[in-house]
Image: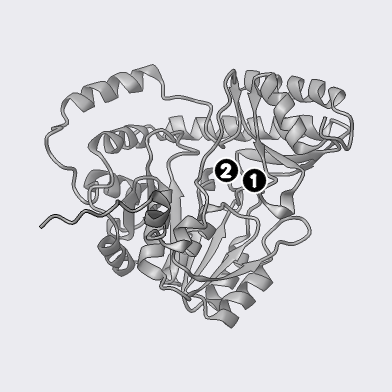
């Protein structure tokens, strides 16, 4: 017999969504209209060259679109292993490093598990930990915004942390840890330590991959979005002990990397000179941008070891960001991090983009009354 009952209201239905999810906010990056110079997401300003795109079109014609990809893109896994000098069994390729970050939460964290996070740092890690109802210990930075290695090591040891996160060079500050500082935290940790090297190509301290030989609790996370310039393809990868990789494969969704993305990454990896040239150009770009900002009297800059730089001025950051956007230049307001209230972040662009940003900044600063939101 049919039951004549009213459907539940949407408010009642939403109560079935876990509180840890309902309490979080969406990860959304605003994109106002009329933007000509986009310097807010630490992307490479360089698209793939046309001849490489033509090569990829030919490769795509060979892809069997009716067939699933493999659970791991085997050709790409071996190419990345050769690129980093590790065994292919140490590589796990993901749909962007963010996908692997979510897999960490599923694989490592039960409710109440201790997690150590430095501040300020890419917010996705805190979101993942809170979605899993982990017990967070947040470690404040040094006065220069660098990570406090002593405090991080103490926190990892004192809490017996299941997971500790280090991002180096760090987003949003652009500051890198030394290899000795990283190893200090790793040695103090009984759980896993993620070393997020999204900006490793720009890092003068060098990669931390050699730590894997001495410390099986090290997880090195990489992305092809920054130095490789493939943010639109969504590829990241993990370097870890083979047994850890095998366990993580049990927690992740299958078929996460499509055949098109694999072909694109393989084509770029076959051109190491292209990557090296673009990294050099971006390093020169951020050096020029930093010098120009430091030469502006009302601007205070934090020197960066990545492809972006943060700066503050006497003008309110939100008002300055708005004025820049009105002139077609998009930068990122760092006010969401309490430690960086008043700071803006700008990515390295082409020479023309940098010049457009600097001109817009100079004009905007002359228009905004100091200490007001006007």
Residue 246: x and y in percent read: 27, 65
Q: How many numbered discs? A: 2
Task: Work out whether mark 2 precedes mark 1 in sequence or the reverse, and give the earlier one.
Answer: 2
Report, in whole angstroms, how far the alpha carbon at label 2 lies from the one at label 1.
6 Å
Of the 4 image quadrants, the one containing the C terminus is top right
Is residue 112 depicted above or below 254 in this figure? below
Residue 283: x and y in percent read: 61, 35
Q: Is residue 341 left or right of residue 168?
A: right
Observer able to see residue 239: no
Residue 341: x and y in percent read: 75, 48
Q: Is residue 37 left or right of residue 362?
A: left
Q: Which of the pair 181/30 is nearer the observer? A: 30
Check disc 1 and report the residue beneath it. 305
Is residue 325 depicted above or below 100 in this figure? above
Observer able to see residue 198: yes
Q: Which residue corresponds to the image point at 61% horizontal and 43% vertical from the top-left?
A: 306
Helix, strand or loop at label 2? It is: helix
Circle 1 Cα neighbour tier, 10 Å, few/some/many (<14 / 14–19 / ≥20): many
Circle 2 Cα neighbour tier, 10 Å, few/some/many (<14 / 14–19 / ≥20): many
Q: Which residue corresponds to the image point at 27% horizontal and 61% vertical from the top-left?
A: 249
Is residue 317 depicted above or below 241 in this figure? above
Residue 139: x and y in percent read: 66, 67
Helix, strand or loop at label 1? It is: loop
Of the 4 image quadrants, the one containing the N terminus is bottom left
**In contact (CB < 8 Å): disc 2 and disc 1:** yes
Q: How is the image coloured?
A: one colour
Check disc 2 and report the residue beneath it. 202
Tell me, for residue 175, which label it has, or none.
none
Q: Is residue 198 left or right of residue 250?
A: right
Is residue 6 depicted above or below 250 in this figure? above
Residue 264's quadrant in the figure?
top left
Q: Which residue corresponds to the image point at 65% horizontal and 32% vertical from the top-left?
A: 331
């Amino acid at each position: 017999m049919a039951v004549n009952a009213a459907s539940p209201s949407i408010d009642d239905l939403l109560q079935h969504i876990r509180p840890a999810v309902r309490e979080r906010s969406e990860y959304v990056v605003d994109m106002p209209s009329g933007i000509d110079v986009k310097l807010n997401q630490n992307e490479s300003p360089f698209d793939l060259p046309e001849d490489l795109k033509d090569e990829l079109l030919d490769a795509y014609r060979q892809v069997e679109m009716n067939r699933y990809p493999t659970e791991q893109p085997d050709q790409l896994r071996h190419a990345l292993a050769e690129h980093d000098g590790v065994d292919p069994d140490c590589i796990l390729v993901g749909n962007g490093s963010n996908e692997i970050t979510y897999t960490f939460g599923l694989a490592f964290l039960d409710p109440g598990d201790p997690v150590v996070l430095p501040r300020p740092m890419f917010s996705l890690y805190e979101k993942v930990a809170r979605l899993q109802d982990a017990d967070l210990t947040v470690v404040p930075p040094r006065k220069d915004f660098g990570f406090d290695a002593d405090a991080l090591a103490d926190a990892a040891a004192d809490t017996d942390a299941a997971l500790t996160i280090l991002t180096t060079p760090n987003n949003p500050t652009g500051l890198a840890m030394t290899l000795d500082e990283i190893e200090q935290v790793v040695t103090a940790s009984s759980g896993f330590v993620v070393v997020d090297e999204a900006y490793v190509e720009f890092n003068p301290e060098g990669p931390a991959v050699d730590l894997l030989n001495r410390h099986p609790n090290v997880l090195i996370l990489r992305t092809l979005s920054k130095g490789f310039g493939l943010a639109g393809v969504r590829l990241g990868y993990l370097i870890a002990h083979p047994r850890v990789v095998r366990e993580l494969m049990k927690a992740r969704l299958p078929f996460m990397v499509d055949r098109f993305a694999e072909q694109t990454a393989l084509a770029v990896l076959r051109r190491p000179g292209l990557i090296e040239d673009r990294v050099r150009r971006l390093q020169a770009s951020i050096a020029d941008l930093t010098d120009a900002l430091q030469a502006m009297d009302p601007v205070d800059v934090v020197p960066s070891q990545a492809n972006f730089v943060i700066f503050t001025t006497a003008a309110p950051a939100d008002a300055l960001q708005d004025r820049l956007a009105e002139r077609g230049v998009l930068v990122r307001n760092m006010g969401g991090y309490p430690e960086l209230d008043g700071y803006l972040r700008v990515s390295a662009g082409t020479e023309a983009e940098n010049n457009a940003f600097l001109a817009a900044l100079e004009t905007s600063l002359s228009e905004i009354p100091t200490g007001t939101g006007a």
